Amino acid sequence: MKKLIFTPITVFALLVFLASCSQEENDIQVVPETKKEELKSEALVKDFIEIYKKESNRSIILNSLKGQDLPVALDAVMPEFEKNSAGTEALAGLKEYQKEIRSTQVAGEALQASEIWMLNKDKDFAYDEVLFAKAPETKDEEDMETVTVYNIKGEAVELNANERPDLPIIMIEDNGYEALKLRASAMNEMLAESNLNTVGSNLALRTASEDKKPIEVTRLTSINLKDDKEPWFLGSAEIYAVVSGTRNEKNEPQVQVIAMTYLDKSGITYRPNQIMVYWEDYSLQAVNIQLFEQDSRTSYKGLVTNISGEVTKLTSDLAKMPELTALGTIASAIISAMPDKWFTNDDDEVDYFYALKKQDYKDFGGAAGNATATFELDVIEHN
């Protein structure tokens, strides 16, 4: 067997080789996650621009966006894109994006839903004056100074994040109106699993027994917000309510999440006639209604886990409290569960209505002075 002989020259050559390998490794640039997201967003927007350039697609997009106040689900217009742009790279890119978004709905972690909306859609503009952007969802809105949008040529344009532009801009968003509907439903399912949401169970029992007693509810018949807490580049606000109270003599908590998808702009009085409370679900004839805006691009599961943890750990104490004290304690626990800083944005506190009784309230101001609402007691008779 031959012995390996290391001369000074071979040792030097080996050291040079190892050093060059080390240098090559050091030259490899790791792309930060935020940069990866920016590159993905840019590619998505440019694919959408190519789709938009085709007149038949453009007509569908603009007519859909101008025809309603709410965002348009991308799923609603994709069939037309597939007919008009079959076989194109742009369509393939858009379909891959849709596939990725749908995977979040199966996995149940982020629960995203893609939609498009348009800033300044009521203004007169030529089709090639429209700008395009992906709603920035991995950055803290308070720290943003500029927003990158793209013109019809695919060229980047920087806009002031703090000043609403007077330009038509089509935005693509994953965490808006459509996502809120999915998340509200999922959050209530999780609250039910934690035994914090039994909403509707009493009514179901009564229906099964053919009890024809009228159903007492409280409706939200009008509401106006001074500030919807949403910057221009994230579009309309996505407001949800957390309704809470006690459901039995032990003061066991009842918590329900209600999506208020119509409540998307400040300074406008909305008249939803939305049922907020089924009084059969509560033992005390008073509830809390706390309004928040879905600003966080984060885990709704984490929020429910926080709420469940904060409220559940009070269960033994709640049983010893007077009912009204327990009601206030539950509301405080829900506030404590809200994130200080998750991912990028917080779920903004919009306003609170504490200890609302089973009665009418006309033009009633919330505790924070941001919301003015009218609540009306209603009785629903059986057929």
Image (cartoon, rainbow, N blue to C red):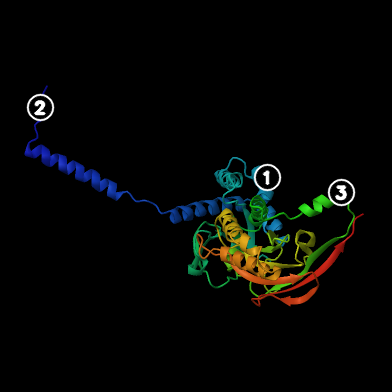
Q: Quadrant of the C terminus?
A: bottom right
Image coordinates for residue 181, horizontal then vertical, percent: 67, 55
Quick one: SS at disc 2? loop
Q: Given the image, on which type of amino acid does mark 1 rest?
A: Pro
| Residue 143, numbered label | none
Task: Give the residue pinned by disc 1.
Answer: 79
Q: Given the image, on which type of amino acid does mark 2 rest?
A: Lys
Residue at the location (81% across, 50% down)?
A: 205
Q: Given the image, on which type of amino acid does mark 3 rest?
A: Ser
State the residue in front, 184 or 120. Answer: 184
Task: Give the residue pinned by disc 2.
Answer: 3
Compared to residue 317, the image places residue 189 above or below, namely above
**Mark 1 Cα-neighbour bin, 10 Å: few <14, some 14–19, many ≥20:** few
Which residue is the extreme one toward the front?
320
Image coordinates for residue 236, horizontal then vertical, percent: 64, 65
2 vs 3, front mark: 3
Quick one: SS at disc 3? loop
1 vs 2, front mark: 2
Tell me which numbered mark, 2 or 3, is placed earlier along the sequence: 2
**119 relative to 19 in the view: left or right:** right
Tell me which numbered mark, 1 or 2, is placed earlier along the sequence: 2
Task: Give the residue pinned by disc 3.
Answer: 209
